[in-house]
Image (spheres, helix red, strand yellow):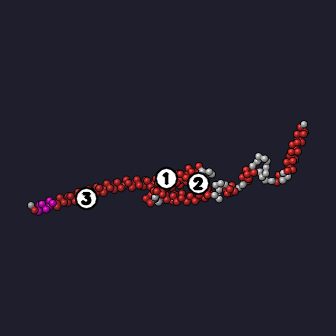
Amino acid sequence: MSSSRVGFRFLNNARFAFRNASAPFRRPGAQGFRFQSSEAGAAEQQSAFQRMWNSPVGVKTVHFWAPVMKWALVIAGISDFNRPAEKLSLTQNCALMATGAIWTRWCLIIKPRNVLLAAVNFFLGCVGVVQVSRIFMWQRSQTGSSLEAAKELEGEAADSAKAVVDQAENAVKAVGEKTA
């Protein structure tokens, strides 16, 4: 009985080889066994560039080019670190901060999830936070120094008023002494 089983297996293998005569020369996974996916084999065969090109967030889609172009905003914000805080726009930097925070979250929710866009939006939000904090620190320093300047001006005005009053009293005394 064991010899018939071996023969049956041999016969099945021979039939399979006859139907697939070019099997040894075929690409693995091209038209394989019943449960083997031809797409999985093709994905393994692709180069890194082909996988990136054919990806749902690949080079030929807006999911790739939007983050690439948005890096220009991040670079411009970073270059503004050298500008004095009094020349920065608070509303513009608040908008960059809010845009970065909102769209970072959104990029992680949408399908396909776009991690590149989430990263650029995260850095855009960070640049906005840094610039807004610089503007607020500068405004606080100006408020404090303007109060001190106002106190100094008040003191100088009081001193000059006292000097005018003293001069007027001296002039009245001088006129009173001449008439008497």
The residue lying at 36 percent from left, 55 percent from top is 145
At label 2, the amino acid type is Leu
Q: Is residue 161 magenta?
A: no
Q: Are marks 3 and 2 in contact (CB under 8 Å)?
A: no
- Dot 3: within a 10 Å radius of its alpha carbon, few (fewer than 14), some, or many (20 or more) residues? few
Residue type at tag 1: Val
- Identify the residue shown where x is 26% and y is 56%: 158
Mark 1 residue crowding within 10 angstroms, few (<14) / some (14–19) / many (20+): some
- Against 169, is 9 above or below? above
Q: What kind of secondary structure does the magenta stretch mostly adopt?
A: helix
> Residue 129 shows which numbered tag?
1
Q: Residue at x 56, y 51 (%)?
A: 106
Q: Is residue 34 visible?
A: yes
Tell me the CA gap for discs 3 and 2. Answer: 63 Å
Residue 88, position in %: x, y? 46, 59
**Which residue is identified by label 3?**
160
Q: Give, as a single range, the part of the protein colored magenta.
A: 172-178
State which tag comes first along the sequence, 2 or 1: 2
Residue labelled with disc 2: 117
At mark 2, the secondary structure is helix
Q: CA distance from mark 1 to mark 3?
A: 46 Å
The mark nearer the N terminus, 1 or 3, is 1
Residue 38 % position (x, y): 75, 51
Q: Nearer the viewer, residue 156 or 43?
A: 43
Mark 2 nearby-residue class (10 Å; few <14, some 14–19, many ≥20): many
How far apart are the two marked residues, 2 and 1, measured between alpha carbons? 18 Å
